[in-house]
């Protein structure tokens, strides 16, 4: 195997260039489709979602679509609405992209941003506590 092939393979893990392109294509088209959907019948008018990532299985039969609801807290209701519209979304996706197999969509809420926020808040509190200890140490040394 040529060197450039092994380097390329290692840099993308086990994901091929084609799969990366398919993931991006599906993400782009799903964003477009979901932007124009009428969410009022699901009880969520003006629902806005940010699609963070799409991961297709290697055979492109299943696509895991990670999303973040913008300004919404009722994630259970959003998940139910997405699952109710899943087949409708998949049908329009099939009209926009031409693949041998149209993947089944699995919508998953991306909680990584929330976890990042919690971690950064925790680090801030640790930093404040550390600064407080250092200032107490400096007062002790002056006396």
Image (spheres, grey):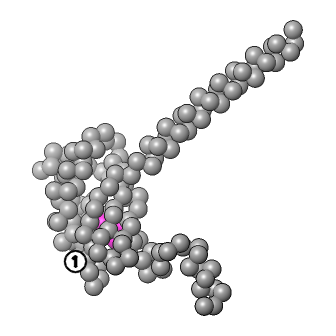
Task: Please state the horizontal and vertical placement of residue 9, each as a whole percent of the image.
Answer: 56, 79
Q: Residue furthest left?
A: 41
Please report the residue visible at 81 percent of the width from the left and 13 percent of the height from the top.
139
Please report the residue visible at 65 percent of the width from the left and 24 percent of the height from the top.
129
Please report the residue visible at 16 percent of the width from the left and 65 percent of the height from the top.
88
Tag 1 secondary structure: helix
Main SS, magenta residues: helix
Numbered range of the magenta stretch: 26-30
Where residue 91 sits, quadrant-wise, is bottom left
Q: Does the magenta stretch include residue 29?
A: yes
Vertical relation: 128 (above or below) 55 = above
Vertical relation: 106 (above or below) 113 = below
Local crowd size for mark 1, using a 10 Å CA cut-off: few (<14), some (14–19), many (≥20): few
Viewport quadrant of the C terminus: top right
Task: Please state the horizontal and vertical placement of residue 74, each as a whole percent of the image.
Answer: 27, 40
Q: Compare residues 12 and 94 and report the one nearer the observer.
A: 12
Q: Compare residues 103 and 13 and report the one nearer the observer.
A: 13
Q: Mark 1 points at which residue?
A: 95
Query: Is 136 situated left or right of 113 in this image?
Result: right
Task: Please state the horizontal and vertical placement of residue 48, each as a whole percent of the image.
Answer: 30, 51
Task: Please state the horizontal and vertical placement of residue 11, each as a whole percent of the image.
Answer: 59, 73
């Amino acid at each position: 195997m040529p060197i450039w092939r092994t380097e390329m393979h290692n840099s993308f893990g086990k994901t091929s260039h084609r799969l990366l392109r398919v993931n991006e294509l599906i993400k782009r088209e799903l964003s477009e489709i979901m932007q124009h959907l009428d969410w009022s019948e699901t009880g969520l008018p003006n629902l806005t979602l940010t699609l963070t990532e799409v991961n297709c299985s290697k055979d492109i039969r299943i696509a895991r679509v990670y999303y973040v609801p913008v300004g919404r807290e009722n994630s259970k209701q959003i998940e139910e609405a997405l699952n109710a519209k899943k087949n409708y979304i998949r049908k329009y996706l099939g009209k926009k992209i031409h693949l041998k197999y149209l993947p089944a969509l699995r919508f998953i809420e991306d909680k990584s941003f929330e976890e990042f926020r919690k971690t950064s808040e925790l680090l801030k509190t640790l930093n404040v506590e550390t600064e407080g200890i250092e200032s107490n140490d400096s007062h002790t040394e002056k006396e």
